[in-house]
Amino acid sequence: MDTYTPAEITERLLALRADHRALDERITRMAANGEDDLESKRLKRHRLQLKDCITRLESLQIPDEPA
């Protein structure tokens, strides 16, 4: 597993969250306009992948506690 500095994690999180928000807005617009359901499903899958990446990076920010 790659190691990241706290600054790199923060920077990556900001980018992923922005992408997630943009996808969310696009999916909402598509639903409101009754656009392609297949494309919407593809975008939702991608949005979920982004959320998983965000969650993994957020967990790296939690310090390990000694046992």
Image: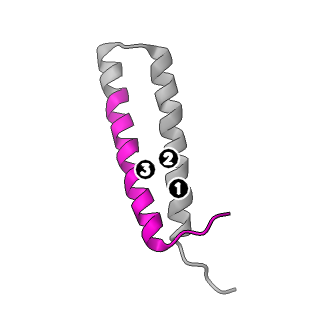
Left or right: 33 with respect to 52? Answer: left
How many residues crowd mark 3 within 10 Å: few (<14), some (14–19), many (20+)? some
Task: Return the x and y of residue 21 as percentages of the image width and height.
Answer: 35, 42
Left or right: 8 with respect to 35? Answer: right
Nearer the observer: mark 3 or 2; the answer is 3
Q: Earlier in the sequence, mark 3 or mark 2?
A: 3
| In the image, residue 64 above or below residue 24 | below
- The residue singled out by tag 2 in the image is 51
- The residue singled out by tag 1 in the image is 55
Q: Are marks 2 and 1 in contact (CB under 8 Å)?
A: yes
Task: Return the x and y of residue 28 as percentages of the image width and height.
Answer: 33, 28
How many residues crowd mark 1 within 10 Å: few (<14), some (14–19), many (20+)? few
Report how far apart the C-alphas of labels 3 and 2 lie in the structure: 8 Å
Q: Nearer the viewer, residue 4 or 56?
A: 4
| In the image, residue 43 above or below residue 61 | above
Report how far apart the C-alphas of labels 2 and 1 lie in the structure: 6 Å
Identify the secondary structure beneath mark 2. helix
Identify the secondary structure beneath mark 1. helix
Please give the name of the residue rendered at 30% of the width and 24% of the height, measured from the top-left corner.
Answer: 29
- The residue singled out by tag 3 in the image is 16
| First to last magenta residue range | 1-27
Please give the name of the residue rendered at 55% of the width and 78% of the height, measured from the top-left corner.
Answer: 63
Indicate the quadrant where residue 4 lies. Answer: bottom right
